[in-house]
Amino acid sequence: EGEITGTITTNRTFAFGNYTLNGIVTIESGVTVTFDAGSTITANQTSGVDALVVKNGGKLIINGTSSSPVVFTETSKVPGSWGGIIMYGDAPINGAGGVTTKTSEDGLAFSYGGTNPAHNGGTLRYVRVEYAGKKITDGTSEMNGFSFYSVGSGTILENLVSYKGADDGYEFYGGTVSARNLISYGNF
């Protein structure tokens, strides 16, 4: 029903339907993006690196249900085909040597870490990410199914599935967020 691409700079709700994710899509600070329950968002590795990135200060709201989850998938169904969902916050980290900020290892080189334990990156309920965990072109940077960089306690993560990815199902880089009912199945 539509293509999602580029930088999202104004609040937007994607009504129930099927969408194509093209490229690295970023939700900017101060912007809220909502996906209606039951929607499917499909990446395609032939178009380059695809990922959904929530920058610090942005919010992603997905209130799927058990019978109508929101599914992020990829056309080829090959693990490692896209970058998954990546969320940044400014909650504290415990970096080696006492550092309080670091640079992300997803190829985007964003800074993460801070002093806001209550950071709120939105709500993810009943979300499934399939075939993610892409290695970026340099071969050293990696994305996961879900990557949470310094995400804070104001964020809700419940009933999530990471399915057949080529890296971690979930990776938490510091932060103070709690999560409930995470399933990681068939990830490398």
Image (cartoon, rainbow, N blue to C red):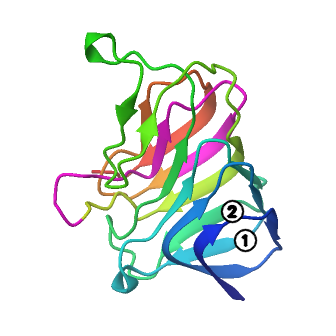
Three-letter code, disc 2: Val
Tell me the quarter of the image containing the N terminus. bottom right
Give the percent coordinates (x, y) of residue 78: 33, 73
Q: Is residue 132 left or right of residue 123?
A: left
Any mark on residue 39, and which? 1
Q: Mark 1: few, some, or many residues within 10 Å (few <14, many ≥20)?
A: many
Three-letter code, disc 1: Ser
Judged from the image, the secondary structure of the residue bearing numbered disc 1 is loop
Q: Which residues are magenta?
A: 137-161
Tell me the residue at 65%/80% (across/down). Answer: 19
Residue labelled with disc 2: 70
Tell me the residue at 44%/81% (across/down). Answer: 44
Can residue 36 be seen in this snapshot? Answer: no
Q: Earlier in the sequence, mark 2 or mark 1?
A: 1
In this rendering, the answer to whether 103 lies above or below 6 is above
Q: Quadrant of residue 56?
A: top right
- Measured Cα–Cα span from mark 2 to mark 1: 5 Å
Tell me the residue at 68%/62% (across/down). Answer: 70
